[in-house]
Image (spheres, rainbow, N blue to C red):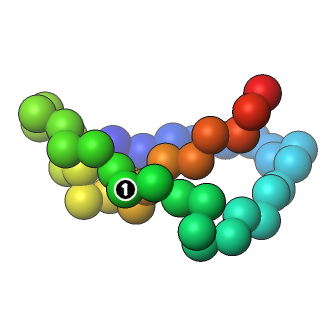
Amino acid sequence: MGIVVDSVSDVTELPPESFKAAPEIDSVIDSGAMMGLVSSGD
């Protein structure tokens, strides 16, 4: 799985402690590609 973009409008730096562990996904998608989740508040 991948994503292709034409441009990037914003880049946000996040401290490592803001990441939550990635959930286990029962899917054919390799969950090892997901490092973690962050809530942005938007």
Residue 16 is drawn in which quadrant?
bottom right
Dot 1: within a 10 Å radius of its alpha carbon, few (fewer than 14), some, or many (20 or more) residues? Answer: few
In this view, the residue farthest toward the top is 42
Q: Between residue 40 and residue 6, name the one nearer to us.
A: 40
Residue 12's place in the image compared with 9, above or below, is below
Identity of the residue furthest to the right in this view: 9
Picture layout, residue 1 above or below residue 20: above
The count of marks equals 1
Q: Is 22 located above or below residue 40 in the figure?
A: below
Q: Nearer the viewer, residue 36 or 18?
A: 18
Percent coordinates x, y for residue 29 in the rendering: 20, 40
Residue at image coords 28%, 44%: 23
Left/right of residue 42 with respect to residue 9 in the rendered view: left
In the rendered image, residue 2, in percent from the top left (x then y), is placed at 42, 45
> Dividing the picture into quarters, in which one does residue 27 lie?
top left
Q: Secondary structure at mark 1?
A: strand
Observer-nearest of 33 and 37: 37
Image quadrant in which the C terminus is located: top right
Viewport quadrant of the N terminus: top left
Tell me the residue that label 1 is attached to. Answer: 21
Q: Amino acid at mark 1?
A: Ala
Residue 41 image point, x, y percent: 74, 33
- Quadrant hosting residue 34: bottom left
Percent across and percent down for residue 22 are 34, 51
Q: Residue at x 82, y 56 (%)?
A: 11
